[in-house]
Image (spheres, coloured by chain):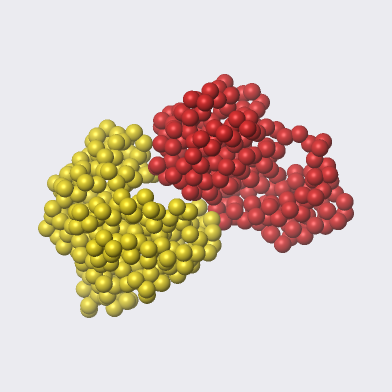
Chain colours: A red, B yellow
Amino acid sequence: MSQQQLVEAMSTIKEQEALTIAQDMVNQGADPFSILDACKQAMAIVGDNFAKGLYFLPELVMAGQILMQISELIKPLLKEASSSKESLGRVVVGTVEGDIHDIGKDIVVLMLEVNGFEVRDLGIDVPAAKFVEAVKEFDPQVVALSGFLTVAFDNMKKTVEALKEAGLRDKVKIQIGGGQIDEEIRRYTGADDYGLDAMEAVSYAKKVVAGGVQ
Amino acid sequence: MDTIVKGKAVEVVIGYDRPTVLIGERINPSGKKKLAQALRDGDLDQVRKEAVNQVAAGADILDVNVVTSGVDEVAMLPRAVAAILEVVDAPLCLDVNDPAALPAALKLIPGKAIINSVTGEEKSLNTVLPLVKEYGAAVIGLTMDEKGIPKDAATRVAIAERIVARAEALGIPASDIIMDCLCMSVGADDRAAVATLEAVQQVRERLDVNQTLGASNISFGLPDRELINHVFLSAAIRSGVTCPTVDAAKVRPTVLALDLVMGRDRFARRFLTDYRARGAAK
């Protein structure tokens, strides 16, 4: 069983087939990172098809579940091998206070992790003070604020201001995301960037750690 | 159980054996950039236009929401209400983030309005219910609490029961409460609609209160959204939703056909009248 077959099965959302191939690869002693890499390629295809309107939300969620099951499968192997692998960077993610939407946020977390970022997921309905605390502790390059409700925009602004007051604003780049976000709202909140889907969160984080964002 | 709301000159009765009442959802800037900008500019022409168009499309009650970034809700809500009252007679449903926006708006309304909404959260119960009582309004109860929207039906029903009990303790009759069992997208969770429909049915059986539902969330992230929305709306009305919050122009034919099927349209008068009006418009 090959990496390419896994990419094919997973990117066409064939759950059983993908899990069987992954298990076979593990049994044959494949490098766990090659399995993870196949997952990453498959998720990129799924994400791309979603962005183009060819795939729909249930398919994105299901691909994520396949990924989680495969991660569970290879976790023991990864632990042995992981010391050699370095993370790309650190991102703090959370849905701001007053909002409880988690689908988009969870997909962002997943895609960041698949792409090699260490992620601190603060969950939903997260007060500004908790973001401040997490930034102090985790020292991320990027803070990603999620929210779907209109009330979230005010709390994104508050979170950005809280980071400023704590003297942490210049240490991080802040990206906001959610179904209704646009440039107007980005300006209102004082964030550095906004994204409309998980791939935009990944590409922004990559750009930031590469020093491409002033 | 009948809920009666009143506009300037119009009385609307919501009840299970009656024709489905439509709450028009379109005066709401979320996802509508032009309306959001107009509100920021203090321009209420669009609000008036949406009010007139929705009533023409068959909306019985109009939901009014002015919450968007850069707009002071407390100042804007009474202005929007005044503008709507200039052009339509329909009862209004005041959809607020901050209950402080309610008193000034409620004072302008000559009939009996709906307050949208109270939740099962302590803070919400303590702030909103006294206003419902003071102004003799009806209220929409959302089946969520401090922990968010429960995934299962049973917890939602428990919250609905708590809201009704707390309202009754203040002397607000159950007939003035409209429950909203809330629906999430089946795109993200394929059990989401079943949970909502079960909750709707149980609320109907146990509390017999009127129920609304915003039924377009259901199809988020999926293609053929209108198809899914209409099928879900039909199932929801069948389960006990009596006054869904909808885009009247889009769903009215479906709802009229369903009312006919459910034996709520004597000699198909409403369906046929609408059918001919639609034919004339083509």
Residue at figure coordinates x 32%, y 72% from the top left:
B208
Figure quadrant of residue A211: top right
Outermost residue, left direction?
A: B9
Question: x%, y% of residue B129?
Answer: 28, 55
Quadrant housing the N terminus of chain A: bottom right
B103 or B222, nearer to the observer: B103
Residue at figure coordinates x 43%, y 55% from the top left:
B145
Residue A53 visible? The answer is no
Is residue A41 shown left or right of residue B206?
A: right
Residue B18 visible? The answer is yes
Outermost residue, front direction?
A: B169
In this picture, is A68 found above or below B196? above
B126 or B65, nearer to the observer: B126
Question: x%, y% of residue B19?
Answer: 26, 70
In this picture, is B222 found above or below B13? above
Question: x%, y% of residue A3?
Answer: 79, 49
In this picture, is B12 found above or below A169? below
